[in-house]
Image (tube, rainbow, N blue to C red):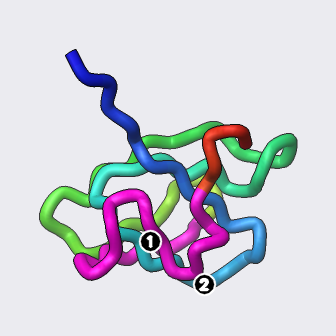
Amino acid sequence: MAASHTPKFHNDAGLASIAIGAREFECIGALPPFDHPHVFIDMGDADEAICPYCSTLYRHDPMLPAGGARPPETVVKDDA
């Protein structure tokens, strides 16, 4: 069985919104060690979702790859 990867995003910069290519993802708030509990968010059919911890507004952009974001520095790298 292939392992699946859920993309993770952060909002260290305090942006009002982040465009992402995924509809299912994790928000970690800020980068460790200042992250909040990692919360799984599923947009379903909606085009946007708000993190219940940090209130970041995530907007789905179908032009981005599933693990991509605008701005790109909001993507959590595997070593974070």
Q: Position of residue 37 (x, y in %)?
A: 64, 38
Which residue is found at the position 18% from the left and 57% from the top?
Answer: 44
Magenta stretch?
Answer: 55-75
Circle 1 residues within 10 Å: few <14, some 14–19, many ≥20: many
Q: Provide the residue designation for mark 2.
A: 16
Task: Please tell me which residue lies in front, 67 or 43.
Answer: 67
Q: Provide the residue designation for mark 1.
A: 58
Which residue is found at the position 64% from the left and 59% from the top?
Answer: 10
Q: Is residue 76 above or below residue 74?
A: above
Q: Position of residue 62 (x, y in %)?
A: 23, 77
As for residue 61 lying within the magenta part, the answer is: yes
Q: Is residue 36 above or below residue 51?
A: above
Q: Quadrant of residue 30?
A: bottom right
Left or right: 3 in relation to 10: left
Question: Looking at the figure, which quarter contains the N terminus?
Answer: top left
Task: Please tell me which residue lies in front, 19 or 2.
Answer: 2
Which residue is found at the position 44% from the left and 78% from the top?
Answer: 19
Circle 2 residues within 10 Å: few <14, some 14–19, many ≥20: few
Tag shown at residue 43 = none
Q: Is residue 54 above or below residue 5?
A: below
Q: Which residue is the extreme one toward the front?
A: 2
Q: Amino acid at mark 2?
A: Ala
- Residues at marks 1 and 2, CA–CA distance in whole angstroms: 9 Å
Q: Position of residue 25 (x, y in %)?
A: 40, 50
As for residue 58 lying within the magenta part, the answer is: yes
